Image: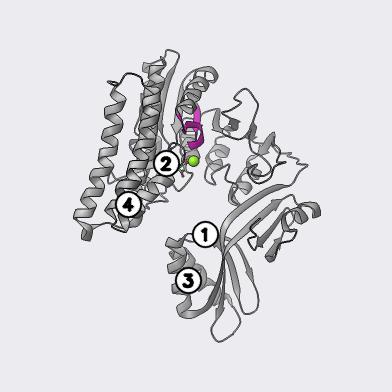
Amino acid sequence: MYINIFKFGGASVNSASGIKNVASIVKKFSSGPLVVVISAMGKTTNAMEEVLKSYMTNDPVAVVDAFQEVWDYHFAIVEELFEDKDHVVYGEIGSLFNQVRGYIRKGHLYAEQRPGYDFEYDQIVSYGELISSAIVHHYLVLQGMNSHLTDVRNLIKTDSTHRDARVNWETTRQLIQQHVPAFFQNHPEAGSIVVTQGFIAGDSAGNTTTLGREGSDFSAAIFAYVLQAKEMTIWKDVPGVMNADPKWMKDAVRLETLSYREAIELAYYGASVIHPKTIKPLENANIILRVKSFLHPELDGTSVENLREWKISTPIYIRKQNQVLISISPRDFSFILEENLSEIFRILAAYRVKVNIMQNSAISFSICVDADPQKIDPLIAFLQKDYETRYNEGLELFTIRHYNNEAFNKITEGRKVLMELRSRNTLQVVLEKVTR
Ligand code: ASP
Ligand code: MG
């Protein structure tokens, strides 16, 4: 028995018509047992982060407003999908929202006992996926499919590194293998589907964890790997993996194929189309990854697979916005030596800051990192204790794989280059932001 994996991201389920389209894709393009992994609807994860932000700053009025917005958005969709106002989905979604409300109320009452940002992030923001998966599940049932909603927190087990949890593969493998194939054996009829949540998981203490932003692809890959799927399909709002994000490069083109290696490189450099942790499990089990458009499901998309000879005729561009360039020098203007570097890396690791690119000169060491104020502000404050630390915000980092001069000019024309790094296949530049 081969189990297929479909992952639907936020953009595919951002409206009632989106969810109807998902149901029609599931009906049309799946044959046999299927696991469907669902993200939060549209921009819900951001909206839940707003709820959390108001909660953390003890602003109950702002919490109510932010919460109401998420509630209204979801119930408008539910009302459009389920004409019968007595349908169980109304009660279920209401009760999921009430769980969040209850959690927040308790946190406001016992503010001094709060467990801290990362933990609370996972307990609150995870409801985006719990709510979306319940809505999609009930809609699939309404459409006559034998959908079975499974709480992924009982299947994917992680450590307790909140917001960036590490998978406990052995326990996860056992749990998924115990539950998922058994469901399909008991329900061999066509249209049997397991619907579950992306992005979220559970730790051994029974608390909710999350796998990092955009982590739903990785969730799907975990199922694909453990279930030894032949293929996994990520349904997106683009025709496949493009050589640049079509939102900012109008003449972006689709790549028909990618090797696992190249996909890992692209994800590593920040191509948002694929989550960095997703490819490795698929490569290890030789599972073909298809990236397809939910708007044109009949088109081919991109396949990522084990290709020894992979040739490309066009550069691939990856743009990362909101970058901070930090340069670090010893206060006495002595040289930057191995001792300083190992100390600096230790600090970076302690603050869980990922370095996007770095460059060393005699007296300063520069790094370009994502502007996550939760991490970067305390990091800079800490570095400033021992090092002369300067930083420059609001920058962009471009990575060009398989670059040529034309590609370099296209990106840098008329802009100030603050840092540049070249290797055989990859060119990276940090640019000052221009407002066009
Ligand atoms: N909903 C989560 C996010 O927006 C996870 C995902 O969509 O992959 O980051
Ligand atoms: Mg998403």
Label 1 to label 3: alpha-carbon separation: 14 Å
Q: Are marks 4 and 1 in contact (CB under 8 Å)?
A: no
Of callouts 2 and 1, the N-terminal one: 2
Tell me the residue that label 1 is attached to: 354
Amino acid type, callout 3:
Ile
- Point out the stretch of residues depicted in magenta: 5-15
Element at label 2: helix
Which label belongs to residue 380? 3
Q: Residue 112 in the image: state x and y as whole percent.
A: 21, 61
Up-down: is 19 above or below 395?
above
Looking at the image, residue 313 sits to the left or right of residue 138; the answer is right
Label 2 to label 1: alpha-carbon separation: 25 Å
Q: Are marks 2 and 1 in contact (CB under 8 Å)?
A: no
Looking at the image, residue 331 sits to the left or right of residue 424; the answer is left
Of callouts 3 and 2, the N-terminal one: 2
Of callouts 4 and 3, the N-terminal one: 4
Q: Residue 269 in the image: state x and y as whole percent.
A: 61, 52
Of callouts 4 and 1, the N-terminal one: 4
Q: Nearer the viewer, mark 4 or mark 2?
A: 4
Up-down: is 14 above or below 110?
above
Which label belongs to residue 44? 2
Element at label 1: loop
User: Which image quarter holds the C terminus?
Assistant: bottom right
Q: Residues within 10 Å of mark 3 (few under 14, many from 20)?
A: some
Of callouts 1 and 3, the N-terminal one: 1
Q: Residues within 10 Å of mark 2 (few under 14, many from 20)?
A: many
Q: Nearer the viewer, mark 3 or mark 2?
A: 2
Q: Residue furthest right?
A: 405
